Amino acid sequence: MSGFESLSKPLKSQSEVTVHTFHPTLEQKPRAKYNVPDWFNHNYAISYDAERSRNVSHQVRQDGRRLINETYNESWWNKHDNDVRISNRLDEVDKWRKALEYTIQDVDREVQTMQSVKEQCERYLEHMRSPLDITLENHVTRDGRKAIDNVDDEAERELKKEVYVIDGIKRQLHQQVQTAFDQIARLTEAKQQLIRDLQDKHTAFAICEENLQLNEFSPNIGYKPDACRPIKGQITPEEWVAFSKYNKDRAEKEIYESTRLRESIFHTIGQSSSDLESQGKASEYALRKRLHELERSLRELEWQKKQTEEEILSNENDIDRLEKAVRDKEPLIKLAMSRQENRHSRPGMDLVRDEVTYGLCDEIQQLTAEKRALEDRLKQTKHAWNILQQQLHRIEDEIAVKSNSVMLENRALETRRRLNTEITPSTETDRNRQLLNMDTSGLRHVLQSIY
């Protein structure tokens, strides 16, 4: 029985107390009387119950104080542990926030670098217009060759090859520009994802920082209904780390791919420049070689013309001499024939067939044969003169053809001197036409129909 129960125990009633009846001499009022032991027991019970109540109260007070201390300490440590957790969470959020900021800066630098490389590739693509136009102009210029000079020579093949090389370079550069544009878009998309993640990190950091600054004396705290309820969209810490790591790894992967693309663009530009320079030198060498052959052939024709003209002049002199020789033979023949005919008029026995007769006959025959030989030689010489005249006309025609070819080859080489001159598009339309590989000269269709 506890102290409180002993205190609550009621005293015995009069009926339960044994009362000794006396026969008093004085008459007394009737009332309940207690025995002395009951009195002592009653006083003892009160003292015992009071002391027991005090002990119980003391125990309750000590238990209350202990509970106050325990709850205070537990609350303090719980708050301290949560402060540490919030602080650690702040550090973790700040670490990822800085990592995302650094990654965004890297992506920004890569986007700027990629944009610069893309513009450089576009400028190089624009500069391909000049070599292509010059090569096509060389084709059209050399199509002006005439007769036998319009041949499919080495220069023609090298110029065709140069057109194919330039077309291939433009296709590669255009593909690289398009790939760079797509890569910039992917970098921008990765950057936007990083920015959204970083903004969420800033918001979470601000909330955690505000929570860390809150205490039990803060004015803006209060009871919240069902504060521990599950929130839709909550994720685990592992998923939170995996999401930020995925965004960071994705951006780093795009940066790596962008770096490789930039290296590929630089390699393409360098290889294109080397191929274009090599093919340009091959084409120019073939043109110069062909020009040298034409000039040598032209000099040969001019020499042949000079020699033929000299031969014609000599032939004409010989014709004059042969004609004079034929004319000179006629008086001699007439003289011999006249002598012989005059001697036929000798009378009688004086008509002797003597040595004079034989001599005059031999002279007539000899002179006639000489005249016939001179006439035959004159005919041959005139025939040779006609052949020389025909050959001279042929040589002159060939010289005109060769002169035209030399002029065209010189014009083609003169045109190729503009290869080192940069041509900047005057309008945005021209720039777009270059980037889209559009031919505005109309020469491509002509060349495709010819070749």
Image: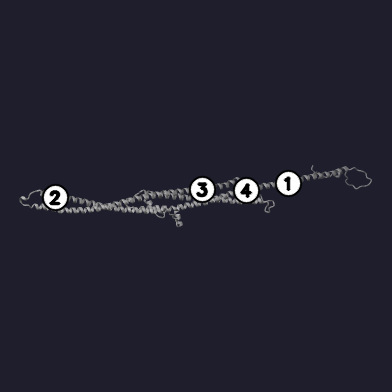
Which marked residue is nearer to the observer: mark 4 or mark 1?
4
Q: Is residue 69 left or right of residue 362?
A: right
Q: Closest to the observer: 145 or 297?
A: 297
The amino acid type of the residue labelled 3 equals Thr
Q: CA distance from mark 4 to mark 2?
A: 141 Å
Residue underneath mark 1: 69
The amino acid type of the residue labelled 1 equals Asn
Q: Is residue 209 left or right of residue 423?
A: right
Which marked residue is nearer to the observer: mark 1 or mark 3?
3
Specify which label sits upstream in the sequence, 1 or 3: 1
Q: Is residue 241 left or right of residue 174?
A: right
Residue underneath mark 3: 259
Specify which label sits upstream in the sequence, 3 or 4: 4
Residue underneath mark 4: 91
Q: CA distance from mark 3 to mark 2?
A: 109 Å
Residue underneath mark 2: 363
Q: CA distance from mark 4 to mark 1?
A: 32 Å
Specify which label sits upstream in the sequence, 2 or 1: 1
Numbered badge on residue 360: none
Specify which label sits upstream in the sequence, 4 or 2: 4
Q: CA distance from mark 1 to mark 3?
A: 64 Å
